[in-house]
Image: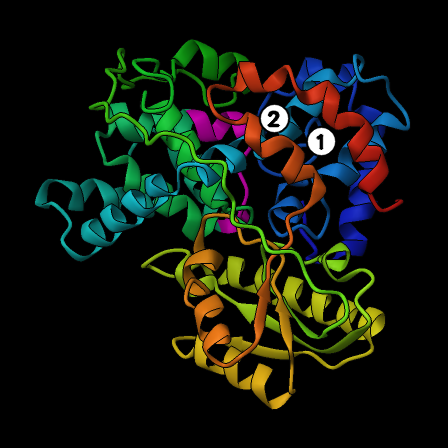
Amino acid sequence: MTFVPTREHARAQLAAFVPKAGRHYAAERNVDAGRGEHGAVSTLSPYVRTRLITEAEIVAAVLEQHTSRGAEKFIQEVCWRTYWKGWLEQRPAIWRRYTREVRRLTANPAAEHEAPLAAVRNAATGIDCFDAWTRELIETGYLHNHARMWYASIWLFTLRLPWHSGADFFLEHLLDGDAASNTLSWRWVGGLQTRGKTYLATPANITKNTSGRFGRITGLADDAPPLPWDDPPTPNSDFRVRLPDRSLRTGLIVTDDDLSPWSSVSGIDSIAAAAIVDTRTWRSPRGVSALVGEFIDGALADAAAAVRQRLRVEPARFAGAELIDACVEWATTADLQQVVVPYLPTGPSADALAALPQRLSDAGIRYANPLRAWDEAAWPHATKGFFPFKKHIPDLLPLAQSVADPI
């Protein structure tokens, strides 16, 4: 299993998977067949994380070969990501709490956690399945979704480690590490999304869905008491979107939250400059793994090539602590009247560029942050659980076919 960080590869992988998105996916999606044997699922998540390919494109491609009912399970899984993004976007305080706690735990780890955390990182906990998943995660940057659930459950209820540290470990190593999907999935396992409802990894379930390859599994917790409940903030669907003025001399900033940002600048009369912004250092206090770094480098290079081809400009590239200063200087030097940044969902890129709108305004430059039509239609429905959200999926399907780029 190789993740080539290009849009071309993402589109080819989608095309190869689409025939299996119906009955085959529904029957086999929970089976973790082992490292490199994940053909029953799409393995598109690293590309969706960076939007080298979008949810709308995926759904549109599936509907060309399947009915919505025939591919219902797969479409729902695509929409889970959209749901998580919308849920967190309406409650950004959850992300802020998480990042504060991760920084605290990283700077001052509890003494009783040091030995088990070291055992986790060395794949030496003595729990064979867990250690195998750790090696797969570190060496490939990927885990099957069902394995992620088992892993989080064992982390929380068997090893009794903080969920924040586990979520951060995933962000360090997952190619598809996403603020919303990752944070909220860990919270769900711990009973913090649906109050009191936790997920317990059991030997029987693991054995059934791994074809028994780990042999007899022992030593796992036999109960999963919910973590202390903290009422989530009231959802707020004011996303503070500012649409571009299409008559202004404009610059485009591209982040790894959206590496296919062309609809954001469609119809603008003058695209005078572009910049690729690297925000990886905001993902985790521990940084990201070399493997994740290589994927980000490749994806940003692919986006830069697309900028050259589509916009006929040579993109600048910015990273590091002086990121905001560099962006403002770039915009000023290029004599821009407006900078367009495709909407930054709650997470590392939004954190890295939080000060940019005001700094640009101080320099007399307009800031615009258009939201994709798919997100605009879906996110407001992510106010409660997934099942109320699911009722609105049929309304998204025609939109997917109208806004998706062709394969």
Q: Is residue 142 magenta?
A: yes
Give percent across and percent down for residue 356. Answer: 47, 69
Give percent across and percent down for residue 39. Answer: 71, 31
- Residue lying at the far left of the rendered structure: 111
> 395 and 257: which one is in front?
395
Vertical comparison of 63 with 109: above or below: above
Q: Is residue 245 magenta?
A: no
Q: Main secondary structure of the magenta part?
A: helix
Vertical comparison of 40 with 48: above or below: above
Residue 133 image label? none
Vertical comparison of 117 with 228: above or below: below
Measured in 3D between alpha carbons, the distance from the residue under mark 2 to the one under mark 1, in whole angstroms, is 9 Å
- Residue at horizontal 67 percent and vertical 44 percent from the top: 1
Q: Secondary structure at mark 2?
A: loop
Query: Where does label 2 land, which residue?
Result: 33
Q: Secondary structure at mark 1?
A: loop
| Marks 2 and 1 close (CB-CB < 8 Å) | yes
Residue 39 image label? 1
The answer to whether residue 24 is left or right of residue 132 is right
Residue span colored magenta: 139-149
User: Badge 1: few (under 14), some or many (20 or more) residues near its Cα, within 10 Å?
Assistant: some
- Residue at horizontal 46 percent and vertical 20 percent from the top: 384
Give percent across and percent down for residue 113. Answer: 16, 41
Vertical comparison of 77 with 294: above or below: above
